[in-house]
Image: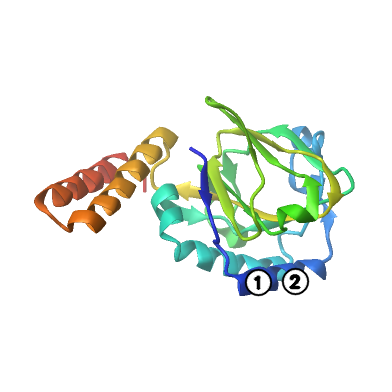
Amino acid sequence: MLLHIPQLLTPEELRQCRDALDAADWSDGRTTVGPQGAQVKRNRQLPADSPIGERLGVLILAALARHPLFVSAALPLRTAPPLFNRYEDGEHYGLHIDGAIRAMPGGALPMRTDVSSTLFLSPPEDYEGGELVVVDTYGTHEVKLPAGDLIIYPATSLHRVAPVTRGVRLASFFWTQSMVADAAQRAMLFELDQNIQKLRARVGDCEEVVALTGHYHNLLRQWSRM
């Protein structure tokens, strides 16, 4: 399931990110992947221990926590600190799949990567190319969103970033370990939750809505891994 979450960041938060990243020191993105990924990755990233990246990551995690659509779709248990990348002058990232397990900073236990997220930080008119291309069982999907918008998709998906042929593409990316590891189960719970919310808004907490809410929580209880 690909899900577009509009306006994750406020205009002021987006301005803070852009100002900080414009003044940041970038390093070769190949230093953060293994030998296979390094063959197809051509971009720049902020080092994981960058003070700028750490500060902006806190801002993004706070935005995620207050956004009900992200919580409903990802059912987050843990989210890795956001990272930041930059593409220009033909830079790209070839077709790849994200690693299943990610080390966490500060000696914390490693986490399983269930949900991948890309937060677009550059307006689409500022650059050409740079589409996030996700391949799943329903085909190939090209994603290029307004600045401040987020796309989430199963981390099991093959994906790539098309070459940026003009301008600069800035983005943040990160992974979430979900309470529900199975992508199909997460999608069913998300659809059920969204329809419950619509029914509640239309008819209130009637007997049927309460029963459906109970089914949702019982399924979450059955499928969650914590």
Kind of residue at disc 2: Ala
In the displayed structure, would residue 20 be above or below residue 216? below
Mark 1 residue crowding within 10 angstroms, few (<14) / some (14–19) / many (20+)? few
Q: Earlier in the sequence, mark 1 or mark 2?
A: 2
Numbered tag placed on residue 157 in the rendering: none
211, 183: nearer the viewer = 211
Question: In the rendered view, does 118 fall on the left or right side of 185?
Answer: right
58, 216: nearer the viewer = 216
Q: Position of residue 116 (x, y in %)?
A: 57, 45
Which mark is in front, 1 or 2?
Answer: 2
Residue 224 visible in rendering: no
C-alpha separation, residue under disc 1 versus residue under disc 2: 10 Å
Circles 1, 2 touching at the beta carbon (< 8 Å): yes
Q: Position of residue 48 (x, y in %)?
A: 71, 59
Q: Secondary structure at mark 2?
A: helix
Residue 220 visible in rendering: yes
Q: Position of residue 219 (x, y in %)?
A: 26, 41
Numbered tag placed on residue 20 in the rendering: 2
Count numbered badges in the picture: 2
Tell me which residue sits at (18%, 55%) in the image.
203
Disc 1 target residue: 55
Q: Secondary structure at mark 1?
A: helix
Q: Position of residue 196 (x, y in %)?
A: 26, 49
Kind of residue at disc 1: Arg
What colouring does the structure picture have? rainbow
Tell me which residue sits at (57%, 42%) in the image.
101
Question: In the rendered view, does 218 fall on the left or right side of 110?
Answer: left
Tell me which residue sits at (72%, 64%) in the image.
49
Tell me which residue sits at (60%, 59%) in the image.
81
Which residue of the protein is positioned furthest toward the right in this rendering? 89
3, 100: nearer the viewer = 3
